[in-house]
Amino acid sequence: MDARKRRVLEALIDDYIATAEPVGSRTLARKYGLGVSPATIRNEMADLEELGYLDKPHTSAGRVPSDKGYRYYVDEIMRPIALDVAERERIRHAYQVRVRELHWFIHQTARLVSELTQYPSLVVAPPMDDAALADLSFVPLGDDMVLMVLKTSTGLVENQTLAVPDDFDAVKLQRLAEDFTREFRGVAIHELKNRILDPLQGDISRYRELWQLGLKWVTELEEGEDKVSLAGPLNILNYPEFRDINKVRRVLSFLEKETVVELVSRSASDGVQVVIGAESSMDDIQDCSLVMATYRMGGNVVGHLMVLGPRRMQYNRVMSIVEAVSEELTRVLHG
Amino acid sequence: MDARKRRVLEALIDDYIATAEPVGSRTLARKYGLGVSPATIRNEMADLEELGYLDKPHTSAGRVPSDKGYRYYVDEIMRPIALDVAERERIRHAYQVRVRELHWFIHQTARLVSELTQYPSLVVAPPMDDAALADLSFVPLGDDMVLMVLKTSTGLVENQTLAVPDDFDAVKLQRLAEDFTREFRGVAIHELKNRILDPLQGDISRYRELWQLGLKWVTELEEGEDKVSLAGPLNILNYPEFRDINKVRRVLSFLEKETVVELVSRSASDGVQVVIGAESSMDDIQDCSLVMATYRMGGNVVGHLMVLGPRRMQYNRVMSIVEAVSEELTRVLHG
DNA sequence: TGTTAGCACTCTCTCAGCTAGAGTGCTAAT
DNA sequence: ATTAGCACTCTAGCTGAGAGAGTGCTAACA
């Protein structure tokens, strides 16, 4: 793979990303200043095809990048692109409203990313489970209803209405919350469940009744709907590779399945990651690419952020956006 | 319009709803026991076309119902269908979790309806604005943050985190909430804004600073994202009339525009309403039908519920579902 | 030896023409 | 009033030809 092959591959992929049409030697020679004739380029393309970087839809069409071609492009050729000022501003301002609820963050993030990239975007919340309890309070609502407000050590707030037995009045509830917070502050949420159900634990039996109601909620928090936010799914309709309605259906329903979460969570390493086409080994998105990143929250609690597009994706742009947003999100969640 | 014409029209529409293919006289004679020959049916069909109830895609295709045809079918021919037990149960159980947040209700309702009907469904929340204040409380969160919890006279709860000035400690906040609730209980939310901004009002100037923060939130509540919930948009991909990607795009983006809310809110009358094709005078949904209903909450505060599908919709089934759900919702919101 | 011009070849896309099939509308018989 | 029969119309689908784009190979060239 000499320098000229690289330049040919780069030009071809750039052109294909821009046009979605197979690229021929003539086009390449004309539009990109490669300094050689179409015939020479043809030879190079034949080599690149033999090396597995290019595919041919049929004999008399131009070439198209293969998964391996894109991979090489992403890893070795492509240079990161700087976001423009407006985009940076957009990202910086996205989290200025001082909401502290997790589902708001993931919703906002998914929308931000899909609007910036013009691709569908999916954000997975870090498991609430791993965070520690910081504070618990109750707000009586009348009608035997109470609003339970949970604050985590990561600074987030979640709340839920609960029905409580008749004999819990406001005073009792407040004392309960204080006792509870004193006893369990700093304990991880998932740990909490064991402690409460453990009969050897001290004088907490009187909370049990109430807490069991709360347990249900905590459990829901872990695997509730709020955990994943999908934004901009319709964006894929703008790309010609999704002219086929069945493909649209396959991909979009994939995004609503539970498997996405597993897929996204699988790649837990730092930094921006790219998955190209069949690399995901998911049938439904054989010809889609994913750009993923993680964000952190109070230590090692980790959430995920993903963009899905056609393999012919503007990788550098999308990667820059995903990186910038995940960093901003980590920053905001830390402060 | 004699009895036989009615039967022909009914059979034709039933068949077209089932198959999405233009219906010919032969098919009608064969599949529905009309007791007459295709030739006779042809004559009736010619009459029905002249009367405007049917259209012809082209000379040698069968007939297709026109808007007027569907209208007559819905108003005069079609009989309501009873939901089966499983569906009734499904609806009854949908609201058993005792959440009291409006956005939960609309989200849940939209999902329920789209799953039952297999069409996209949209639910518009009643304007928070019209409800009266029942109770206000604050939960301190540390970091100068506070959770503001608003309870309305309709029994719903909304909450929002706010940043507050340094000098509001827990005690001060609690007293503030008590004073506030005492003074403004029963006042409509939209009225509240005027009262607070009115300098002639009594000794409330000390709340102003805090409340102005809250005002922003209340304003957002009125026209925030939580006001509308769309579920099952992908369902339309299952119907052959949406094989064209541009039509899908037109319709789905219509559902995300602000105009839907206006359209839905326009028909404020009781009971289930049907809008067929061009009756909506909305270009983007020329060949879609809408089934809409309202639900009530604490008197006359009204929300809306809508199903969108192809004109070739299973009107009786969808109408039954929409009616049952809106009634159940009204019932639940009342208790 | 690497590059290039030339050229035959291959494959797809499009368009016109044709056919089969479905359905109609009219006429005449019942 | 109903129906059988039949000519007519229109579409969907197939076929074949031609244009166009692009390739791969060969031979000439620097």
Image (cartoon, coloured by chain):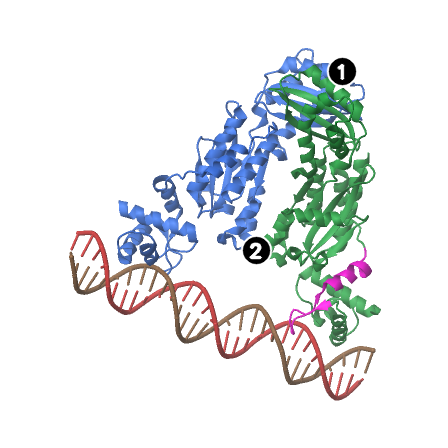
Chain colours: A blue, B green, C red, D brown
Q: Which residue is mark 2?
A: B245
Front in this rendered view, residue B123 or B88: B123
Q: Amino acid at mark 2?
A: Ile
Magenta residues (range): B54-79
Is residue A196 placed above or below D26 in the rendered structure? above
Residue A172's label in the rendered image is: 1
Left or right: where does residue B268 sit relative to residue A49?
right
| Residue A334 placement (x, y as % from top left) | 52, 24
Q: Position of residue B10 (x, y in %)?
A: 77, 64
The answer to whether tags 1 and 2 share a subunit is: no
Secondary structure of residue under mark 2:
helix
The answer to whether any part of residue A79 appears in the image is yes
Residue at position x 75%, y 36% from top?
B129
* Residue B316 image-quadrant placement: bottom right
- In space, the residues marked 1 and 2 are separated at their CA atoms by 59 Å
Q: Is residue B72 magenta?
A: yes
